[in-house]
Image (cartoon, rainbow, N blue to C red):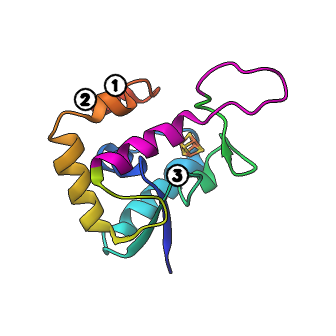
């Protein structure tokens, strides 16, 4: 079983305490967190993943809660979440599609983002920001 994880969720898992977008979402987060503790190989993405799979903001494989800005009617707005992913990839020296052991990724996120004080620079605009301080 290979888990699909979008890169910025490496930060979300570091702070998750049971709050989220819906009951199904938080239940899935707990399950995923438990599975990831077994240190499986994961594929890192810049798109919806196994966490988004149970999120009410995932509409047809696209995150709608974090749309970056208003755009003309009919034009899809960029995913703010994909921007977070891109910054995590850059900080960790990784790229979408990479396969990595979960704990190795967790360590990169801890060292290069959380301990480096970059977390809020990346996702300070997220609605859950206060929970991650
Ligand atoms: S808010 Fe968007 S990025 Fe976050 S879990 Fe839901 S669909 Fe995925």
Location of residue 94 in the rendering, given as x and y in whole percent from the top left corner? 35, 58
Estimate the x, y position of residue 23 in percent, counting from the top left.
Answer: 57, 46
> Would you identify the image quadrant in which residue 125 lies?
top left
Numbered circle sitting on residue 133: 2
Split into quadrants, the picture shows ligand 1 in the one at top right
Above or below: residue 32 compared with residue 20: below
Q: Which residue is mark 1?
A: 130
Q: Which residue is mark 3?
A: 46
- In the picture, the quarter occupied by the C terminus is top left
Which element is circle 3 on?
A: loop
Give the spatial CA distance, label 2 vs label 1.
6 Å
Q: Are marks 3 and 2 in contact (CB under 8 Å)?
A: no
Nearest to the observer: residue 55 or residue 63? 63
* 87 part of magenta stretch: yes
Mark 3 surroundings: few (<14), some (14-19) or many (≥20) residues within 10 A: many
Q: Nearer the viewer, residue 83 or 3?
A: 83
Q: Could you say whether the residue bearing mark 1 is in a helix, strand or loop? A: helix
Q: Earlier in the sequence, mark 1 or mark 3?
A: 3
Q: Residue at x 62, y 56 (%)?
A: 53
Image height of 42 relative to 23, above or below: below
54 on left or right of 3: right
Residue at the spot 52% in from the left edge and 52% down from the top edge: 46
Q: Nearer the viewer, mark 1 or mark 3?
A: 3
**Residue 69, position as x, y percentages in the image:** 62, 21
Closer to the chain start, of discs 3 and 2, is 3
Q: Which residues are magenta?
A: 68-91
As drawn, is 66 to the left or to the right of 11? right
* Label 2 close to label 1 by CB (< 8 Å): yes
As displayed, is residue 98 above or below residue 118?
below
Give the residue drawn at x 38%, y 60%.
Answer: 33
Residue 35: x %, y % from top left: 40, 70
| Circle 2: element type | loop
């Amino acid at each position: 079983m290979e888990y699909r994880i979008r890169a910025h969720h490496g930060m979300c898992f570091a702070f998750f305490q049971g709050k989220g977008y819906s009951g199904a979402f938080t239940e899935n987060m707990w399950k995923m967190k438990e599975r990831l503790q077994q240190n499986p190989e994961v594929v890192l993405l810049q798109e919806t993943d196994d966490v988004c799979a149970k999120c009410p903001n995932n509409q047809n494989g696209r995150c709608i809660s974090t749309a970056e800005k208003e755009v003309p009617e009919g034009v899809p707005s960029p995913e703010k979440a994909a921007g977070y992913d891109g910054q995590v990839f850059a900080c960790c020296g990784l790229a979408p599609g990479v396969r990595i052991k979960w704990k190795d990724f967790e360590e990169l996120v801890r060292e290069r983002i959380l301990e480096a004080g970059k977390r809020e620079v990346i996702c300070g605009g997220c609605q859950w920001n206060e929970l991650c301080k």
